Image (cartoon, grey):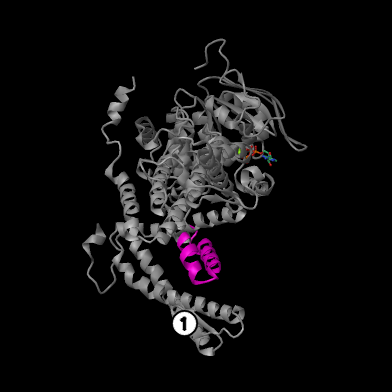
Amino acid sequence: MSAGQGSPPALELAGLRKSFGKTEIIRGVDLAIGRGERHAIIGPNGAGKSTLFNLITGRFPNSGGHIRLHGNDLAGLQPFEINRMGLSRSFQITNIFPAMTVFENVRCSLLWSKGYRYSFWNMVARSRDLTLGTEAILEQINLTARRNLPAGVLSYAEQRALEIGITIAGGADVIMLDEPTAGMSHSETDYIVDLIRQVTVGKTLIMVEHDMGVVFGLADRISVLVYGEIIASGAPEDVRADPKVQEAYLGAALEADH
Amino acid sequence: MNDTFQNTAAKRPLVSLRDAAPWLVATGFLLVMPFIFTANSTITIMNQMAITIIFALAYNMLLGQGGMLSFGHAVYMGVGGFMCMHILNMVEDYSLPLPLPLLPIFGGLFGMGLATIVGAFSTRKAGTVFAMISLGVGELIAACSIIIVAFFGGEEGIPGDRTYGLPFFGNEFLHPIDVYYLIVFWLILSALLMYLFSRTPVGRMANAVRDNPERAEFLGYSARKVRFISFTASGFFAGVAGGLFAINYEILTEENLSLILSGQILLITFLGGVGFFFGPIIGAIVFTLLQTVLSLETELWQLYVGALFVATVMYFPGGLAGVLMMHYPSVKLGKVKSLVVPYLKTLVPAIIGLLGTAGFIEIMFHGRHAAVGDEQMTLFWISLNSHSALPIVVTLVLAVGGIWVARRFAPEMAEAWHRSITPNAPPPPAQPPSTRDAA
Ligand SMILES: Nc1ncnc2c1ncn2[C@@H]1O[C@H](COP(=O)(O)OP(=O)(O)OP(=O)(O)O)[C@@H](O)[C@H]1O
Ligand SMILES: [Mg+2]
């Protein structure tokens, strides 16, 4: 499972900091995530998990420290540049193209990786690789029957599935999912977890998740973020047993969960 | 090396008849129009219409497709037009071998050139920032028209003569009809290219960036660059329209750069409907008709156009095209016939009411503004005295009565429409269920 000796980790954070005005939200995060690892980030509300995602994906500039993707420093890069380097993310609040059809949503997320870039001399409808690729993703996220509906009319769970489809469509090898199962029923959660497992085979997965069942079922490693710092990081059993974690967060969450 | 791929793709014909049909019909229609409307004055109106259509389609590449609200798009058409005027004069002065039908390309290139410069900073953001920059740049270039006299010709503008160039296959473009076919050629070409643009990767991403620029950035696209490409493409076609304007009118003045024209094209595009490719075409046709025909009938035509615009924004944000497309499901379900009676019941009184209102306004306007002693006026081909009470009462009764009746039947119309777009609706009690509805 672990990467070959000497090759850099998929994602590496070193002394990462972020302040909004005077308040420091991310207070020195060090973390290395190996290739092919499924890594969960957990922590109480407001701990800075989404902010961490926003820093990694270039949505916000950081206030200090480094982020490296496959060994390349991401300093100063825009979200689209980072995406082109093979990192793709989903959002805690569903972020799709609601007015466009489900099919169009997926097709747009394929365009760059299929090499179409800013082309104005190809017709999308005539590009078989695009059509076939889009259909394959739709099949994978189980939305083939909904392909011609505007994405905005899908049910919440379907929109979340579409969001995951958009995120993985471009073939990025580092996938970041921010609370993919938030607000879902049990059966919907099971469906999404299966989907995540399926579509991230052979990829590096970093996910924020509150549902401990999902976390312990999916993750190879867990990091616990509390108040902008990682207080524990390791295999699920070790993290679960860590007294610091018990005290700060997990005990309460586990109790609430059962 | 591409051959295997091409072969699989080649199973589909290059263009299907279904895709080509609207274009062929439109082309045929444009070609025969001058045989139906032969008067020179009508052909002049059609020329103006065609130029406006190109400009409106170009504008909608920004507004409808790219989500960029521009308050200063006339400058791209204007600069393209001025440039063409200068080129035309150079063709005359130096006897250059440039056939007139090619002139609009230069309008396009200069429109695009200006759009490249402005777009480099204005497309960073959409929304208010873009709108304000477009307004500022529009104002700035309009102001240049009286400063840079050599290029814009000051208050007189730049005149030219399209007939001095080389004859094009013997045609010297003396008559409006010659110009008509030249413009129609460019109209079809531009419209087709703009339509195809919307089907390309960057055209699809223009829609994506319009709907959710942030998400597009996380899919590998720079929202700014996507906007920039749409913006320059729009500048090109606006410039083509400018070149055609130069050919048609043989003069460009500061009015061609004015914010009034920029506002007008926004109005036209919105009126037609920004959500559909053909929306601006409808808008341009309706507006040009109002501008040319209605303006002959009444001085108040702009009031009515303004009212139409406000009503569109308030009640039909999809524009006229949106209203048409609302009925697409009814057509598909074969239920259009069920709409005729309820629509007539509402729309006929509504039209009577509106005409009554307009008549009332016209009488009041005449009564106040006509010269003293001039009490006779013509309203809807009826001669009447604008100072007597009877016409005022009649128009008021028609206005109030018509609108009252229309409002009474409006819910019925809405109900009928809802039923017509719903498949398998329960049939009205008296009639047996029709098999077509079930399909
Ligand atoms: N753009 C911003 N400007 C100012 N403060 C912000 C901004 N984004 C986040 N914050 C603050 O940073 C803190 C962490 O927010 P963040 O969304 O990262 O938490 P989280 O761990 O994802 O929480 P949750 O579990 O509720 O999603 C919060 O106190 C929030 O108010
Ligand atoms: Mg969060």
Name the residue nearer the viewer: B60 or A21.
Answer: B60
Task: Please provide percent x and percent y for residue B274.
Answer: 48, 52
Left or right of residue B426: residue B240? right
| Residue A238 point in image, percent of width and height | 59, 24
Whether residue A183 can be seen here: no
Is B314 magenta? The answer is yes
Q: Identify the element where label 1 is drawn.
A: helix
Q: Which residues are magenta?
A: B288-317
Residue B257 locus on image (x, y percent): 60, 50
Ligand 1 within 8 Å of the CB at mark 1: no
Residue B351: say if magenta: no
Asked whether residue B10 appears in the rendered view, the answer is: yes
Q: Is residue B232 left or right of residue B163?
A: right
Provide the major secondary structure of the magenta segment.
helix
Q: Position of residue A255 (x, y in %)?
A: 59, 39
Depth order, front residue of B411/B394: B394
In this rendering, the answer to whether B59 lies above or below B306 is above
Q: Where in the image, quadrant-wise, is ligand 2 located?
A: top right
The residue lying toward the viewer, choosing from B409 and A33, is: B409
- The image quadrant where one finds the C terminus of chain A is top right
Q: Which amino acid type corresponds to the residue marked 1 in the rendered image?
A: Leu
Residue A82: quarter of image: top right
- In this view, B424 is above or below B30: below
Residue on which disc 1 sits: B398
Report the chain holding disc 1: B
The structure residue drawn at horizontal position 60% and vertical position 54%, both measured from the top left corner, is: B255
Which quadrant of the figure has residue B166? Answer: top left
Q: Residue at x 36, y 43 (%)?
A: B170
Label 1 environment density (alpha carbons within 10 Å; few <14, some 14–19, many ≥20): many
